Image (tube, rainbow, N blue to C red):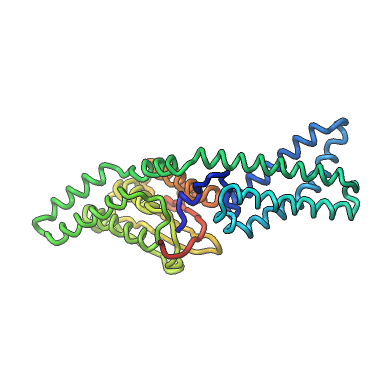
């Protein structure tokens, strides 16, 4: 199962990046081209010739760079299974192979000068750049070690508002004599909710589990708000085997209830929509926006919480967009995450 631990594997050698991650590709492309720019500036002797030199160098670098990334993407599963040093050597071998092939190709079309010295210099630069990238990703992943990431995650997932606990207990007390069975069910739901909040929560969970937890939370709030709280679920187009970070829905629904339904003073609907588009799973939650609330109404802590957890799980592959969209009196939050599927282990 995908988890934060998989983003930070333990090994005796350097930590290798996940070459299926878009954020890794972006960092490598920017980093290599930045180093190439520095090299062009250092070697330049005539400022007027600098643009041509930069374009020529970019033309030489981009082909082996893209080829290396594609090969490493294909070999990513093998790289993740190898020990750190073995994986690093394989990564270096791929880089040297694509660099030498691209250089020979360029010599054939007279893009670069022929000769052994030029090829040797290109291979030396490939070794230096690969070493620099390995050092960068190793340092970055050690900085975000599993202990630190899971400690941050525990702190983030523990931020349930105290008022919810007090309101739920008061609601149970209000029906304990008239509806003892419902009061007992509510206490069981509250216990299940806090059990999930207290567990590790460092791995992706099935979508069905998140929906069940969200329904329990809304059931507790409906005990207090009654018919004022209306909920519309649209999950038919979402694959049932999808995985997502834990405790993603509950904070958003709590925001929707606390800042949307409670101040409204009349019945209001929370709409929860799941959809699947290609390799992305999209989540949309909207609630009434009381008059005068403004585009940034309410406590933004839950949104900051979720944005940080998305970064921990997915790096740059997830997005939290339109977080303050007020359209026709409704407040909408949209999230897009990579579509991961499979049964948890």
The picture places residue 78, in percent across and down from the top left corner, at 59, 58
On screen, residue 49 above or below 230: above
Residue at 44%, 43% in the rendered image: 149
User: As rendered, which of 59 and 219 lies closer to the eye?
Assistant: 59
Q: Position of residue 331 (x, y in %)?
A: 42, 50
Q: Which residue is located at x 56 percent, y 51 percent?
A: 83
Task: State the residue in front, 337 or 108.
Answer: 108
On-image quarter of the N terminus: bottom left
Q: Quadrant of residue 153?
A: top left
Residue at figure coordinates x 52%, y 46% from the top left: 11
Residue 314: x %, y % from top left? 51, 51
169 on left or right of 86: left
Q: Where residue 94 sits: x, y (%)?
A: 70, 53
Q: Is residue 45 left or right of residue 196?
A: right
63 and 240: which one is in front? Answer: 63
Residue 25 sits above or below residue 128 on the image? below
Look at 51% across and 38% down and name the residue there: 143
Q: Is residue 74 visible?
A: yes
Q: Residue furthest bottom?
A: 236
The quadrant the C terminus occupies is bottom left
Q: Is residue 244 above or below residue 128?
A: below
């Amino acid at each position: 199962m995908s988890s934060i631990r998989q983003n930070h594997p333990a090994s005796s050698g350097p930590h290798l990046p996940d070459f299926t991650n878009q954020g890794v590709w972006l960092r490598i492309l920017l980093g290599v081209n930045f180093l190439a720019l520095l090299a062009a500036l250092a070697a330049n002797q005539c400022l007027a010739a600098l643009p041509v030199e930069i374009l020529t160098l970019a033309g030489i670098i981009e082909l082996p760079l893209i080829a290396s990334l594609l090969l490493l993407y294909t070999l990513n599963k093998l790289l993740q299974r190898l020990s750190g040093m073995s994986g690093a050597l394989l990564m270096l071998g791929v880089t040297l192979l694509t660099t030498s092939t691209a250089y020979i190709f360029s010599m054939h079309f007279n893009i670069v000068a022929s000769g052994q010295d030029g090829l040797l210099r290109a291979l030396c630069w490939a070794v230096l750049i690969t070493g620099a990238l390995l050092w960068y990703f190793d340092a970055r992943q050690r900085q975000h070690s599993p202990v630190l990431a899971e400690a941050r995650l525990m702190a983030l997932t523990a931020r349930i508002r105290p008022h919810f606990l007090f309101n739920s207990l008061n609601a149970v007390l209000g029906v304990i004599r008239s509806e003892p069975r419902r009061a007992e069910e509510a206490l069981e739901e509250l216990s299940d909710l806090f059990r999930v909040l207290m567990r590790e929560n460092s791995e992706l969970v099935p979508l069905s589990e998140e929906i069940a937890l969200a329904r329990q939370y809304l059931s507790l709030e409906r005990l207090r708000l009654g018919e004022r709280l209306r909920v519309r679920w649209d999950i038919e187009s979402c694959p049932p085997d999808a995985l997502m970070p834990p405790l993603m829905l509950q904070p958003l629904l709590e925001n929707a209830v606390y800042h949307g339904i409670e101040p409204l003073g009349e019945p209001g609907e929370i709409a929860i929509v799941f959809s699947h588009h290609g390799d992305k799973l999209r989540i949309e939650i909207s609630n009434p926006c009381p008059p005068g609330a403004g585009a940034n109404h309410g406590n933004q802590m839950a949104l900051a919480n979720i944005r940080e957890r998305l970064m921990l799980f997915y790096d740059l592959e997830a997005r939290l967009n339109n977080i303050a969209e007020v359209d026709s009196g409704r407040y909408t939050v949209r999230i897009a995450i990579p579509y991961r599927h499979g049964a948890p282990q």
